[in-house]
Image: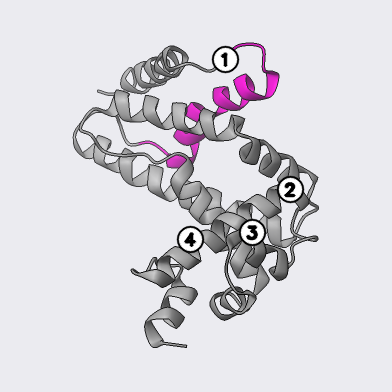
Amino acid sequence: MPENTETAAKTGARPGGRNARVRSRILEATTELVARHGVAGLRYEEIAELAGVNKNSVYRNWPDRAQLVGDALLRYAEDSAPLHDSGDLRRDLADFLVALAERMTSSTGRALMQAAIAAPGNTDLDEAVRAAYDHRLATAGKRFDIAVDRGEIPPVDSYFLTELLSGPVYVYVNRRRHPFTREVAEKIVDVVLAGLRATMP
């Protein structure tokens, strides 16, 4: 295995060129199959067939199945609800909530949520979901730190703020009574930011 490929496989990096495209297809196929069957029914042969690659490509890049599942869900989390810095905190947070709701209501998103809920503790899927959530939390924390440095919000616990913002999204999505619109996202953001700023000296 070339050194750069081996390093990428261990670190989860995204190398350039053909191998990047192969890895991307494998991760997408893995996510879809985990959503369909869970981790217990995950077979490298089926991943390779769905990804349109040779089975050896899957084994070569991910000899450990738990690492493959973890990398697939991490990629899914990275792509599902990014929290960018446009310079406008309100807009960035609303964008984040809208993207989160869209991914949660997708067929793959719903299936992954159901698979995670159904999975007993200490399984590969359970650990992968936790790792993906921790990554999303770390990304959100960086955006919140920027907002604190700019004086837009007071210092705040990243976990608490992320849960405060995303909690209503889960309620809307799970109850399915009303669509989660951008207007709803902005209302949530406005209420949360108003509460935070009320504590600023």
Task: Residue under label 2, please give it.
Answer: 36
Give the magenta part as a residue range: 156-179
Instruction: Indicate whether 195 appears above or below 127.
Output: above
Q: Could you tell me if residue 131 is visible in this image?
A: no
Residue at image coords 35%, 16%? 194
Classify 10 Å Cα crowding around label 1: few (below 14), some (14-19), many (20 and above).
few
Quadrant assignment, res 16: bottom left
Residue at image coords 60%, 33%? 106
Q: Spatial distance from mark 3 to mark 1, Cα to Cα?
A: 32 Å
User: Does residue 13 appear to the left or right of 107 in the view shown?
Assistant: left
Mark toward the start of the polypeptide (3 vs 1):
3
The quadrant in which the C terminus is found is top left
Q: Spatial distance from mark 4 to mark 3, Cα to Cα?
A: 12 Å
Mark toward the start of the polypeptide (4 vs 3):
4
Mark toward the start of the polypeptide (3 vs 2):
2
Task: Residue under label 3, please give it.
Answer: 50
Image depth: mark 4 or mark 1 in front: 4
Image depth: mark 3 or mark 2 in front: 3
Q: Secondary structure at mark 2?
A: helix
- Return the mark for residue 179: 1
Look at label 3 and name its amino acid.
Answer: Leu
Classify 10 Å Cα crowding around label 3: few (below 14), some (14-19), many (20 and above).
some
Residue 34 locus on image (x, y percent): 69, 53
Look at label 4 and name its amino acid.
Answer: Ser
Image depth: mark 4 or mark 3 in front: 3
Residue at image coords 23%, 34%? 86
Task: Residue under label 4, please give it.
Answer: 24
